[in-house]
Image (tube, rainbow, N blue to C red):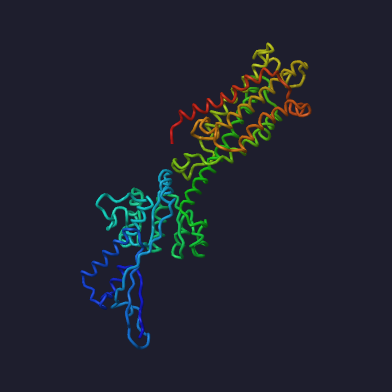
Amino acid sequence: GTLVLCKGAPLEVLQHCSGWLGAEGPERLDDVRRARVVAANDALAARGFRVLAVALRPTGPGPFDLESEQLESGLLLVGLVGLYDPPRPEVPDAIRQCREAGIKVTMITGDYGITAQAIARQIGLLDPPPPGDDGGMADPVRVIDGATLTQIGDVQLGQLLKYRHRLVFARMAPEQKLRLVQAYRALGEVVAVTGDGVNDAPALRAADVGLAMGQSGTDVAREAADIVLLDDNFATIVQAVRYGRSVVANIGRFITYVIASNVPEMVPFLGMVALQIPAALTVLQILAVDLGTDLLPALGLGAEPPDPGEMRRPPRPRSQALLNRAVMVRGYLVLGLTEAVVAMAGYLLVWRGQGVGLMELRELAPALLQHRAPAAVQAVQTRASTVTFALIVAAQMGALLACRSDFRPFWQVLRRPNRLLWLGFASEPVVAAILVLVPPLAQAFGTAPFPAAWLGPMLLAPLAVLTADSLHKLLRPSR
């Protein structure tokens, strides 16, 4: 005759069984035996097994014309099959990193609640069971099944997701997974969803970032997702977050370094207007800093490796701009203002060394601006302007080291490898020396050699910038 074979979730299949297949043949499935099946199912699930029930029913000879409801009634339970897919060994550490980084991890699965709880405990999403707990029952506070979620209203669900972390949702239907994504987004969260099946497509599409599995995922899931995870590894997502944060941080460091030189480049012209003294820099010298000495170091900052503490900081707010208040305060008021003070001090000291004070310099300003000054006076102005230019370059070398970290002092990141940055650091004095010592370039940029005795005091410029930045990091409010 015809034999009907059935497999599925044990508790669901058990409802369609009237007996089980024992050693002597079919036996009636009474309440005691049903309880034994449920206990065996829960024991396997508590160890992290995905459990399937297998049942059969002989229909006898005749045509195969019964409806599905009739075929799935009066079944004989054959047994339970436990399938175990062990979590990858790197997943618990990835879950820990997410928790340290302020990233909420929520597990949504179609598995049985006890199975989902066991797996969540194995990967560190949930705490281990207390002594004496064999994991035979799901934690009603942390593990929520589909039937319970159906009875929860949208307002209660929002409160649940807002105030409870490390949740596990089991026996979820596709529309319930979509509802959870929408509820998280309604709370203002940035939601990333992983999925591999056709049923995951709506949630992948609704999330801020949808991640489909590249190896086990379906074409529909990959089409609906924003990112395809080639190795199907959750730990890869955490590493991507780490490098993504590093990219954003490097852009901020790049901006801080670039705008730091704007202040010492601007102050000479403000001083010319306010104090009525000659400009301490020429326009070409400003371009030499922005497009010459600063170019390679700034690119080196953009290639900084991730900071070891990057995943121990909370996520940046969605509304926070790259050019934010903290970047501008540090770039303009801390680094830039220190560089401006150092550069203008060097300019005035060169004139002071020639016996010209501030009042006398104001009297010389009209002749220097109109190019009517004597050659000796013009030579002093060129030398003072060159010293100002050299001090800005030296101060930017200090700013380069300071900008390698937004929170840690410079000496803690000196050993961090970055060949491009160190090449840029070495190129700054080389480019500046070429512009000063090569006669055609010196004539074009308005520079002139200055006494070698000035090189020693110029070493104080990067030290002054590093000291100011270290004090700022020490005194700024902690994140």
List x then y, in percent, for residue 335. 56, 29
What residue appears at the point 44 percent right and 42 percent down from the top-left corner?
A: 314
Residue sticking out furthest to the top: 355
| Left or right, residue 147 beside residue 457 | left
For this view, does 318 lie left or right of residue 72? Answer: right
Find the residue positioned furthest to the front.
Answer: 23
Comparing 293 with 367, the one in front is 293
How many numbered discs?
A: 0
Q: Is residue 10 above or below residue 381?
A: below
The residue at the point 23 percent across, 76 percent down is 28
Of residues 158 and 210, the one drawn nearer to the viewer in this rendering = 210
Asked where in the image residue 61 lies, by quadrant, the reply is bottom left
The percent coordinates of residue 477 (x first, y second) are 44, 32
Quadrant (top left, top right, bottom left, bottom right) of the C terminus: top left
Q: Residue at x 44, y 52 (%)?
A: 191
Res 461 quadrant in image? top right
Q: Name above or below for residue 93 compared with residue 84.
A: above
Residue 379 appears in the rendering: yes
- Please state the horizontal and vertical placement of residue 374, each as a whole percent of the image: 77, 16
Evaluate whether residue 276 shows in this view.
no
Q: Nearer the viewer, residue 292 or 452?
A: 452
- Which residue occupies the foreground of this view, 154 or 312? 312
- Compared across the picture, whether 415 is left or right of 106 comes to right
Q: Is residue 129 above or below residue 388?
A: below
Which residue is at a point 36% across and 84% down the rendered structure image? 2
The N terminus - image quarter? bottom left
